[in-house]
Every structure is written in C-alpha cells, then in structure tokens.
Amino acid sequence: MRLSSRTRGDVLILDVAGSLTLTSSRGALFSYVQGLGRGGFKKLVLNLHNVGDIDCAGIGELVNVHGELSNAGSGVKLVLPHGTVRTLLEVARLLTVFEAYDDEDHAVLAFNEDVRSSGPTEAARRALTVSGMSTI
C-alpha cells in the first residue's frame, strides 16, 4: 500500500494505492491519518480510486479512520474505485457510514456545499445515481 497526501483548498486528500489488506497495510492507513490529524485539518477525502484489493482488515481500518475523524470533529468522504473493491464496500455496508463519490471533484465540492446545506449536494446525488449508487 502506498499513501500520499495533498491539499485542494482547505480539503486534505489522501491518495491510497495498492492493497488495503491485513498483510499489506497492518494499520498503516489509520496511523497515517492519526499523524495528519495532528495538523488540525477538518476535511479529508480518502481517494481509494487506485486500491485494487481490500479485505476485512482493510474495511476495519476504514471504519477506525471514520471513528477517529468523527471524534475529532473532522469530516471524511470517499472516492471509490470501480469493480470488486467497490462491491465489497457496498456488501460491507460501508457506504451507509461514509459519503462516497465517483470522483475527487465531487467529493471536494460536497465539502464546500456542506457548509451551505445539511447534506450532500444535488450534483453529488446525480453523480452517484448515474453510477448506479444511491446511498446518499
């Protein structure tokens, strides 16, 4: 697993690539996010677009990240990959926990829209509906 971070305005984007599994990550994602959290960010996009494999340990790590950030008052949104990883996240019902988007632009835009409204934007809803997902 490879992790890198960058910003777009006031949104921190964490790019995750490779496998998010017990043997490949071993808690690295959670530790990385904890380290970033010391910087005081309030908006995080986890870009999973380049994640090719995930198992129950990886799903657990995503849940831990969500809990850690929620407890710190930070928001988190996912950019989802296509294929098997997306299906596993749907089956695990993780998409009922996270707001999820098909692309980074919509995830970042949703943070900006959240300031003005109480939920996901109409554009974000349309983006997910077009992709066949209607979890938000």
Image: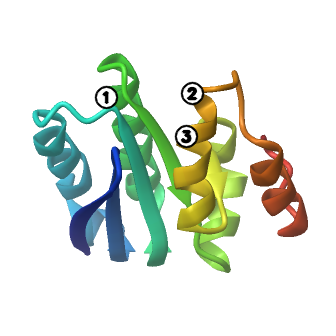
User: Can the viewer see residue 59?
Assistant: yes
Q: In which quarter of the image is residue 94?
A: top right
Classify residue 85 as left or right of residue 122.
Answer: left
For the residue carrying disc 3, how many other residues have a C-alpha within 10 Å: few (<14), some (14-19), or many (20+)? some
Residue 21 is situated, as x and y percent measured from the top left of the image, at 35, 66
The residue shown at (58%, 73%) is 81
> Which comes sooner in the sequence, label 3 or label 1?
1
Q: Camera-side residue: 84 or 99?
A: 99
Q: Are marks 3 and 2 in contact (CB under 8 Å)?
A: yes
Name the amino acid type tagged 2.
Answer: Val
For the residue carrying disc 1, how many other residues have a C-alpha within 10 Å: few (<14), some (14-19), or many (20+)? some
Q: Mark 2 points at which residue?
A: 115
Mark 3 residue element: helix
Q: Mark 1 points at which residue?
A: 68
Mark 1 residue element: helix
Name the amino acid type tagged 1.
Answer: Glu
The quadrant the N terminus occupies is: bottom left
Measured Cα–Cα span from mark 3 to mark 1: 22 Å
The residue shown at (18%, 36%) is 37
The residue shown at (43%, 52%) is 45
